[in-house]
Image (cartoon, helix red, strand yellow):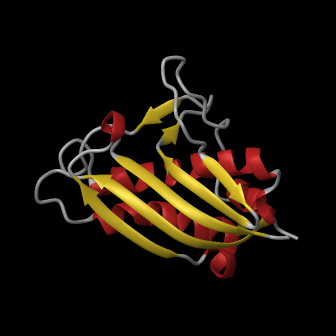
Amino acid sequence: MTTPETRLAELGLSLPQPTTLPPNLKLPFSFINIRGNRALISGHPKSAPDGSIAGPYGQVGKDLSTDEAYAEAREVGLSILANLKAEIGELSRIAGWVRVFGMVNSAPGYSEQHLAINGFSDLIIGAFGPEIGAHARSAIGTHGLPMNFAIEIEAEALLKE
């Protein structure tokens, strides 16, 4: 049986370490909140390979192109998967992706948020296949995001019993 981890490796992708916060940053929530068979995933930025927060920073349409934002949204997805794996053990425990909410720090007039967040959606469908990976999704533009992140993504997934 092919696992999501195997599919990621076949795509030439690897997970970073789970996200670690800088010592001066305290968050009153967890990145992954398991409730029964639901994994509620807080908004994530990208993590560097060592798990440190790595942005991306700035406005899409000004500091990043749509293609760069697409690639960064995929990297945010890998960070989410690393944190999920740390919480649930194996990504094959995911029974289905329910919803995705992608936020894009957008320059005035920028209107390709949907194309940027496709980087995340394409990653999830590629790693989990179309049945498990299919999800409802919104992609919105914002005037700003915490810490000047360019992309932030939150989601919900169902877990196998």
Instruction: Residue lying at the far bottom in this picture: please name it.
Output: 131
Q: Nearer the viewer, residue 156 or 89?
A: 156
The reply to whether residue 14 is visible in this rendering is no
Instruction: Residue lying at the far left in this picture: please name it.
Output: 109
Which quadrant holds the C terminus? bottom right
Number of numbered discs: 0
**Figure quadrant of residue 159:** bottom right
Rendered residue at 31%/44% (across/down): 145
Rendered residue at 38%/39% (across/down): 56
**Figure quadrant of residue 156:** bottom right
Left or right: where 103 falls relative to 58: right
Is residue 141 placed above or below 75 in the rendered structure?
below
The reply to whether residue 141 is visible in this rendering is yes
Is residue 18 placed above or below 24 in the rendered structure?
below
Rendered residue at 52%/33% (across/down): 27
Which quadrant holds the N terminus? bottom right
x%, y% of residue 25? 49, 24
x%, y% of residue 30? 60, 42
Rendered residue at 33%/45% (across/down): 150
Left or right: where 157 falls relative to 148: right
Is residue 44 placed above or below 23 in the rendered structure?
below
Left or right: where 64 falls relative to 119: left
x%, y% of residue 100? 49, 66
Q: Nearer the viewer, residue 144 or 27?
A: 27
Instruction: Residue lying at the far right in this picture: please name it.
Output: 1
**Figure quadrant of residue 129:** bottom right
Instruction: Residue lying at the far top in this picture: please name it.
Output: 23
x%, y% of residue 110? 17, 59
